[in-house]
Image (cartoon, rainbow, N blue to C red):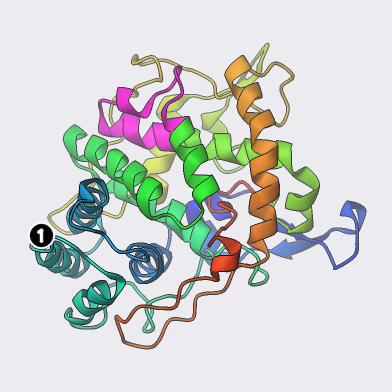
Amino acid sequence: GGGGGGGGGGGSCATVRLPSGSDSRAAEPFPMPPEAFSRPVPLQDVTSAVVYGLQREVVVVAIGEQDEARRGALREWLATLSALLPAEPNRQQMGRLEAMCAHERAISPERWEELLGEIEAPLLPTGGPAGGIAWAACRGASADARGYPCGLWLLFHTLLAQARTDAQGVAALRAIRSYVRFFFGCQGCARHFLAMSNLEADPLDGVRTASGARLWLWRAHNRLNARLNASAASEVLRLGLPKQQWPTPAACPQCRPRYTAGGRRWELGAVAEYLHGTFCRPEPGRPCSSPGTVESAAGSSAVIGIAPYLTAPNLTATDAYYLTAGAVLAACLLACYHCWERASAPAQTNRLLPPSPRSCGRGILWHDSDGSSD
């Protein structure tokens, strides 16, 4: 999907949809929705991801009195939304929910539904669709494609883009990790994300600045794209979800201007500017911070490269390990992917929606929000 909605660039036919029973040679171009090329990304997709997560993901399993970790993760997530979600009315609503949860020692699914119901509908009044969940940039060719996984990536990138201080950016990135660990429905995806956060060469806990947080998430997103392509290429193509490293040269020519022995190298300053333009939403009296000083994985301002997995022959040992180990995980995710249910949000209500079928482990293929299908 389109550059986090807008960063895809590079043409109007961005995904490939194969007719049932056909092979990759029979691929037909499927035009992405025009909103997929918007910069900044449509707020509708961001708010839809928040509402979907709160209604279907967060308290599917009760949070007990002794479950300090999950309760803390929920508070961190709500604090991040109340501080960084675009639009003041949206932040106020999340602040109300945060304050209500601060007094809850244990939260059952039924109590969570009551808490959501105590907030005046709509849950997010600015930028969201009337029913709470409807995809614009994240619309797919079918119920199998895009939707919530796309919107969740847009939400993560947008929250980091809104951070105005280093402390906010670092805290938001850690809150994202906790959300994925405790609340994301696809457990295999969560394990892989947590493994990426602990990579010795690029640990999440080594991030010290807001710019570094944005770039860390961008690197993680590209690592996932590469893994999905390398470990299940035929199935990814069959679903019409081919992945490239993003931003593509067409979307951001200055982001990868130079070739080296290992392939194209990323110019991180240009990438930071691109992320800023794609995900930041300035408001009156609340401008976005500048992209900031580039912080590389090694902690210095430099031009570094994410291994260009799709073209370069020389993967690092760490990347090769994850590409190999990811094959089994991707196969499981792709099997669960066919059980994905399209969100059917009720109009003007904050009630909980039924979770996806347990038989699928609520698994989804985490994909398609980054312009990598161009």
CA neighbours of label 1 inside 10 A, class few (<14), some (14 to 19), many (20+): few
In this rendered view, identify the residue nearer to me: 298 or 55: 55
Picture coordinates of residue 59, whole percent (x, y): 32, 64
Q: Give left or right: position of 247 versus 163.
A: right
Tell me the quarter of the picture where residue 108 sits.
bottom left
Residue most extreme to the top: 261
In this rendered view, identify the residue nearer to me: 372 or 226: 226
The answer to whether one can see residue 244 in this image is: no
Q: How many marks?
A: 1
Q: Residue at x 34, y 14 (%)?
A: 300
Q: Residue at x 20, y 49 (%)?
A: 287
Picture coordinates of residue 34, whole percent (x, y): 57, 66
Q: Residue at x 31, y 26 (%)?
A: 205
User: SS class of the residue under badge 1?
Assistant: loop
Whether residue 249 is situated above or below residue 243 in the rendered picture: above
Residue most extreme to the bottom: 347
Q: Give left or right: position of 290 versus 215.
A: left
Q: Residue at x 46, y 23 (%)?
A: 199
Whether residue 49 is situated above or below residue 301 in the rendered picture: below
Whether residue 204 is situated above or below residue 9 in the rendered picture: above
The answer to whether one can see residue 120 in this image is: yes
Picture coordinates of residue 96, whole percent (x, y): 12, 68
Residues shaded magenta: 196-217
Picture coordinates of residue 315, whole percent (x, y): 66, 19
Q: Amino acid at mark 1?
A: Ala
Tell me the quarter of the picture where residue 30 sits.
bottom right
Image quadrant where one finds the N terminus: bottom right
Q: Which residue is mark 1?
A: 102
Decide whether residue 80 is among the magenta residues.
no
